[in-house]
Image (tube, rainbow, N blue to C red):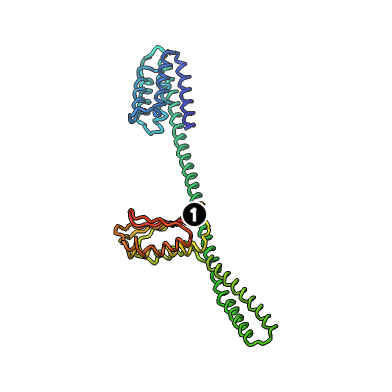
Amino acid sequence: MKNELIDKALLFLCGLFFVIVLGENEDIVVASLISIVIVLVPNLQFGINYKQEIFGAFYILAGIKWIVCLPFYPVICYDFFKKKRYKLVICCVLVLGYYFFVKQNIYETVSSIKEQRYICVVVLLVLLISGRMAVVSSKGQILEEKLKKIRDDGKEKENLLKERNLILLEQQNVEINMATLKERNRIAREIHDNVGHMLTRAILQTGALKVLEKDENLKAQLNVLQETLNTAMNNIRQSVHDLHDESINFEKAVNELIEAFPKLDITFVYEVDGKLDKSIKYGFLAIIKESLTNTIKHSNGEKVKLIIKENPGFYQLFIEDNGTNISENFVGGMGLCGIKERVEKLNGMLRISTENGFGITVTILK
């Protein structure tokens, strides 16, 4: 766009300089102003198609009456070359030919036929230069558009590559987390099966020795040994339980639970960033299982919305189905007893809704 304006400005100045030579000062102002308007017409909003071509055609015809219009033909035809409106360019050449081959001096501003022909030749040369400039400008614009497209494509591919890398990193983190959880589960199982059994056997053997031993001093030492073994057994049992709890991927466990209810169309949303306490994990899993079971037994709903969300001060479990026929046994009887008891154990709050299907909301403070 910048190069195009420079080209038009140079062509306009050439025409203005050349028309001054004709010495028709009043016509110079009119012709130059009209040419400027026609050059700027593409940027004006007239609501008319081919508006520049229409104004340009009138200007070309005006050149038959006023010779001062001829020097501005090149700047007028610049856009016609770019738009490939060659018929209008040919009209300009025909007007120039009319002036060149006429046998008499038409206007007082031209002193002779020779000068008149000289004007036509110079304008024709500048017209050819205008066409060359328009072609170069068009090629430059095409190259700029291609370069812009290449840059945009490159930026898009770069963003796509970054997005894929993030996805790969997330998948890698998930795989590492799953491998860690599996290893913890394996270690917990091995400790329970091997070390736990050996400690149990040692405790039993110590108890047997206490029964058989008559020496009170030795019995006292066996009591100390048995207490030590019991303490070790309790510590190992607690460690094994902790490892097992940490090895449970809560989100995966919920998804596996959902798969156990193929008759229900369940939408699951999980928005928890931190780690849930094991009591909340087991409590939520039990509530979800009981709710889905009750939906099948006591509701005619087929779609279930399940949301587990972490807020700054509390966790929330939201379950809702699209049932329209809720069993009274479920709402007012034993159907919710298990859920209520589990929520009470977690010191949480339970809200029940029967509008637009049956829904429960469980809120557990952190």
Please tell me whether residue 199 is drawn above or below residue 303 in the rendered image.
below
Q: Residues within 10 Å of mark 1 (few under 14, many from 20)?
A: few
What percent of the width, then of the height, locates residue 136? 47, 35
Residue 271 seen from this side: no
Residue 66 appears in view: yes
Residue 18 position, x and y percent, is 46, 19
Which secondary structure lies at badge 1?
A: strand
The answer to which of 233 and 222 lies nearer the viewer is 222
Q: Position of residue 292 (x, y in %)?
A: 38, 63
Residue at numbered disc 1: 314
Quick one: which residue is furthest to the left in this view? 325
Q: Is residue 266 above or below residue 202?
A: above
Query: Furthest-top residue in view?
Result: 108
Residue shown at the point (51%, 51%) measured from the top left:
312
For the residue pair 115 and 95, the one nearer the viewer reads as 95
Residue 228: quadrant of the picture: bottom right
